[in-house]
Image (spheres, rainbow, N blue to C red):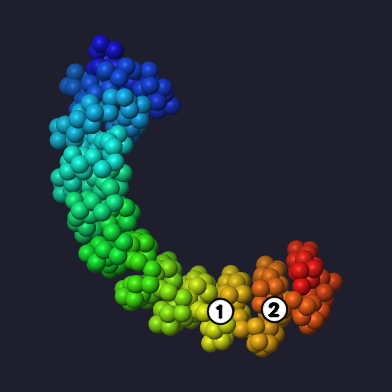
Amino acid sequence: KNDPLEVGRLLLQFSQRCEMGVAASLGSDVHDQLIECLIVPSESLDVEVELSEAAHLHWLLSLTLVARAARPALVACLGRSVGASRGAVARASAVQALSAVAEENDSEVVALLTSYVDDESAVVRKAVVSGLAAVASLYDGRAEEAVRRCLHDSADDVVQAALRTAPLVCKLGSPRMIKAVSSCLTAENWMTRKMALATIGIIAPPGDSSAPGVLAVSLEDTNTWVRVAAIDGIAKVAERGDAAALALVAARLDDRAWNVRAAALGAISSLALAGDEHAAKMVASQLEDEYPSVRIAALEALSDVWPRWDRSILKLVLMRVHQDPDSDVRVEAIEALVHSSFVGDEEIIEALRTCEREDREAEVRSAAESVVERL
């Protein structure tokens, strides 16, 4: 305990399994010295124990997590170390450790982190914007500005970290943040585009009339999952009964990808008003889809929008009960009858009793029996 350098040398030779135990056994008076030793290794350390990226991350976080009593000294120590560290990995590790140990809304720490938002290393910039999510408070103007700048970063990892942090520091419906996030919808990386859509869905206020139009540009994206995210985002921000939003997602019922068609059906279920005859017919048209997952999504959506007086749709659902080749679809069709029929409907009860007697799958027969009892 009197020789931090020697302690550092020994720590680096232990397996990672021992980290927390060793860190906890140290006196709080050596934590700050030890962290400085680990962040800026002395030239007296042997080459074979020079810090690797993993060593930086694991040891610093282990030490900060057990050093709550020494928080002020550690914050000061780590703050100095961010600037003193020679390598990018060391600076990033110091930023991560500082973010872990600092109190939320620590003005000095937020100022320090934002000062490194233009660091030459993408590893450090990512650590900074991720750290702001832990330290900055909601509506912190400095943090919001730093995040917006990182949304235009040249490194995908930094942009994606900024997209994760954005909802934690900006006001709901912030026009400047929505504009900055929207710029990511044309990013080359498909995951970045997908994350940007999800972020807009979080920061745009419910019922925002302009948000569906912003999200709609991604409905024609070349990546399947980006198109799904665009549909999900529109369903989240638009209000039920929004005819324009409903038309946008309904257009994807003809998408070449089955998961996009399934997402469109889920969105119609969220946006259409109960008993919307036009929406119900659009949904019912997907009961013949070649993919079982799409047929199931159509049946689930019908439960929400099916006009109770429309017996033509009833016949289509009964056809799924009796003739669909997939047992999961037949079970879902049986459940749809419960949600979309009147109790005591003799036509439905008789159809389910036939299914209960004749279906080749036990799970389908059991579902039919259960629903007959409920009707």
Q: Which residue is mark 1?
A: 274
Coordinates of residue 165 in the picture (x, y in percent): 30, 52
Amino acid type of disc 2? Ser
- As drawn, the residue found furthest toward the right would be 357
Helix, strand or loop at label 1? It is loop
Q: Is residue 251 left or right of residue 365?
A: left
Q: Is residue 85 visible?
A: no
Out of 180 and 125, give the one closest to the viewer. Answer: 180
Q: Residue at x 37, y 62 (%)?
A: 202
- In this rendering, the answer to whether 306 lies above or below 189 is below
Image quadrant for the N terminus?
top left
Out of 310 and 185, give the one closest to the viewer. Answer: 310
The label number, if any, that marks residue 341 in the structure image: 2
- In this rendering, the answer to whether 306 lies above or below 19 is below
Of label 1 and label 2, which has the lower sequence position?
Answer: 1
Amino acid type of disc 1? Ala
Out of 203 and 24, give the one closest to the viewer. Answer: 203
Coordinates of residue 369 in the picture (x, y in percent): 80, 67
Coordinates of residue 295 in the picture (x, y in percent): 60, 74
Q: Residue at x 28, y 48 (%)?
A: 137
Q: Is residue 58 visible?
A: yes
- As drawn, the residue found furthest toward the top would be 2
Q: Is residue 354 left or right of residue 59?
A: right
Tell me the quarter of the picture where residue 90 sits. Answer: top left
